[in-house]
Every structure is written in C-alpha cells, then in structure tokens.
Image (cartoon, helix red, strand yellow):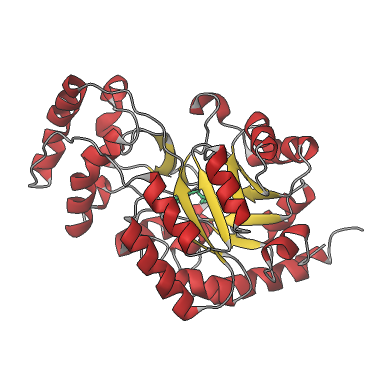
Amino acid sequence: MWPNTNITRMLKIRLPIIQAPMAGNVTSAELIANVSNAGGLGSLGAGYMSPENIRESIHRIRSLTDRPFAVNLFVPNKPHVTAKQITSMTRILKKTCKTLSKDIHPVKPPYTYAFADQLQIVLDEKIPVFSFTFGIPDDTWIKELKRRKIRLIGTATTVSEACLLQQKGIDLIVAQGMEAGGHRGSFLETEENSLIGLFALLPQIADKVNIPVIAAGGIMDARGIIAAMILGASAVQLGTAFITCPEASAHPGYKKALLNSHDSDTTLTRAYSGKLARGLKTRFIEDMRRYQQLILDYPVQHALTRSIRTAAARNNRINYMSLWSGQAASLCRVMHADKLIRTLDREVRKLIKHIPA
Ligand SMILES: Cc1cc2nc3c(=O)[nH]c(=O)nc-3n(C[C@H](O)[C@H](O)[C@H](O)COP(=O)(O)O)c2cc1C
C-alpha cells in the first residue's frame, strides 16, 4: 500500500502526500518546491492572485524544482448583493477600522481577478496538475485542460459533489471533511448541510466513485494518514500542518497562534469572506457574530474586509487577521517542508508495521 498508490502513479510523485493549496500568502514557491523535491506534491494557492503573479510564481517554482506541482483556483459564483447592503456592511466595519486606524470605503466590481484570465495561465504554462474548489469549471474549460493532459483535482464535501465531479470527467477528488482549515468547498447544497466529518465522508465517497480519492481535514501525522488510507483514500492533502514550516509565507503571529492552539480553538465563520471557513477564533469573528444576517456574499465580503486584514497583518493585530486552521492545529510542528515530508514517510513506514495484515 505505502507509498505506491494509483495517485502516485497518476501524478508521477513518489509519496501520496499533497501540500494543500492555501490562498492568501501561505504557499511560497520555496514551500511548494521543497514538498515536490521531497517526493510529495506541492500546490500553489492561486485563488486570490493576479494572472501576472500566477505566471511569475510558476516560473519561480520551476526554477526550484523539476518535479510535478499543482496550481489551484476558485471556481467563481455570482454574488447577490445590492449597493445598499455594501454600504451598510461598510458602516459596520468602520468600527473595526477605527481600532486599526484605517479607513474603509464601499467596494465595486470586479471583486476578484477574472477566473478565465487566471485559468488561461494554467493552460499556457501547461501545469502538470490543476486543482479547484467552490464548484466545477465549465465543460469547455475541462475539455481544454484535458486536451493539454493536465491532471484535474476537484473538491467534494458530500457524496453528491464527488459523484458530479466524477461524471464531469475529473481525475481525482479531494474529500474535504468538516475538520479542514480554510474555506468549505461545498457547491451543491448549503455549507451548513455539507459539514461531514472526514471519518464519515471518506468511506461513503470511496464506495460511490471509481476514481481515486484524496483525504483532507485534520490530518497532521502518520496516524491520520494511515487512518485515511484505510477509510478509502489513496493520498492525503495536508494544509495546516504545512503553515508552520519556515518556508511558508504566513505571518509569524499566525504561525505562533497555531502552535499555541488547542483542539477547541477553531470555529466556522463567514465574517472575513462571506463564505464559510474554519479558522482560529478571533476578536473580529466574535464582533461580527451579531451581524451574521448582514454579511455579504463571497467574494464581496472578502473584497470589503481586505483593508482590515492587510492593516491587521501590518500592525501585528492577530485578533483581526484571518487565521485559517484545521481542528488538529495543536499537532503542528516547526520543520522545513522537505523534512516534514520525509518525517511523515518514515513515521508511516514505522506505524504501518503495527497494523494487523
Ligand atoms: C490557510 C488555508 C488556506 C486554504 N486555501 C485553500 C485554497 O486556496 N484552495 C483550496 O482548494 N483549499 C484551500 N484550503 C483547504 C485545504 O485544501 C484543505 O482542505 C485543508 O487544509 C485540510 O485541512 P487541514 O488544514 O486540517 O489539513 C485552505 C486551507 C488553509 C488552512
């Protein structure tokens, strides 16, 4: 079983360990290259990046490794917001801005970089692996990506989403459990109706699809990796475990908060982006609880809170930053990414011997 699986063969990697794409200044080129050079699959979280930045990052990764890596994007959804709603949320956020000595103004479209422009870079650069979340790209894009022999990884939080991804011709599925850090990838039902723990989700997806499944959510060490593989995964995707690597470009205060965290320190919130995401509890999340009904659809809320997040990071005001984290963050280690990959491999080989045949 370990380390050769249908996924290592398909992605041409040595170990079935994927460093999760993490948009928002976490996945530096050094992190990605070190993971890929050590035999795993590094992933660039490019969802918030301009097409030019994506291209630059790809070139930088390629200067550091000749191993496969993935680029990840967010499949867009149309937000339903009015100018009046934006004005009223801006007014609410003014109080936080005052605390941070920052001004805030209503945002106007476009709220994000165009998905088509971002994806064109993936096509032009012939990236070996393209992963995505929040939905499924249109058939024409899928056809174009497949024509260039780019492997496709979609994200599912329910069995129905996994079945639809398979039906659309996607090569691999990330089964994202509710323990996972960052945004929920849900796209068929409401996020609240798609909160399934990884132990329950994995075998149900594995029983219903015949394409390989990647487990994500709360996996930090060999115990989680082996459990996921027994439950039906052919690879694992770890996010939080890589944030505390020295090469990860996350804010030092964020890394420290993860290392000092406990099992019950995360929560699910829409306060930062408008889309449900798991992160460490912060003062900002707490302050926004009473305005739940007024939070704007993704990505408008995200665009509006950008100045708050930037000012908070600049001034080390951790309590106003988004500290995305899975439920097992307390198991984070401070280790270079290549060493973490090698350590996970060694620990799996050791632990696997204790499992009855
Ligand atoms: C900081 C952070 C940012 C993330 N950004 C993305 C992203 O851009 N695209 C994506 O598909 N998943 C993203 N995720 C979710 C991961 O792919 C994965 O599901 C999650 O990290 C697994 O749970 P874990 O953090 O407990 O390992 C992010 C997770 C974190 C912690």
Q: Describe residue 309's horizontal placement relative to residue 249 as left or right.
A: left
Image location (x, y in percent) of residue 332: 50, 61
* Residue 106, x across and y down, in percent: 14, 33
Residue 198: x and y in percent read 64, 41
Closest to the observer: 169 or 192?
169
Residue 11 horizontal side relative to residue 309, left or right: right
| Residue 248 visible in the snapshot | no
Q: Is residue 141 above or below residue 276?
A: below
Q: Is residue 232 left or right of residue 262?
A: right
Q: 111 or 145, which is in the foreground?
A: 145
In the rendered view, would you say 110 is above or below 47?
above
| 181 in relation to 33, above or below | above
Image position, residue 267 (x, y; %): 43, 38
* Quadrant hosting residue 210: top right
Q: Residue at x 30, y 27 (%)?
A: 289
Could you tell me which residue is drawn at 34 percent across and 57 percent down? Answer: 51
Q: Is residue 128 above or below residue 74?
A: below
Residue at 60%, 76% in the rendered image: 38
User: Which quadrant would residue 63 be assigned to in this image?
Assistant: bottom left
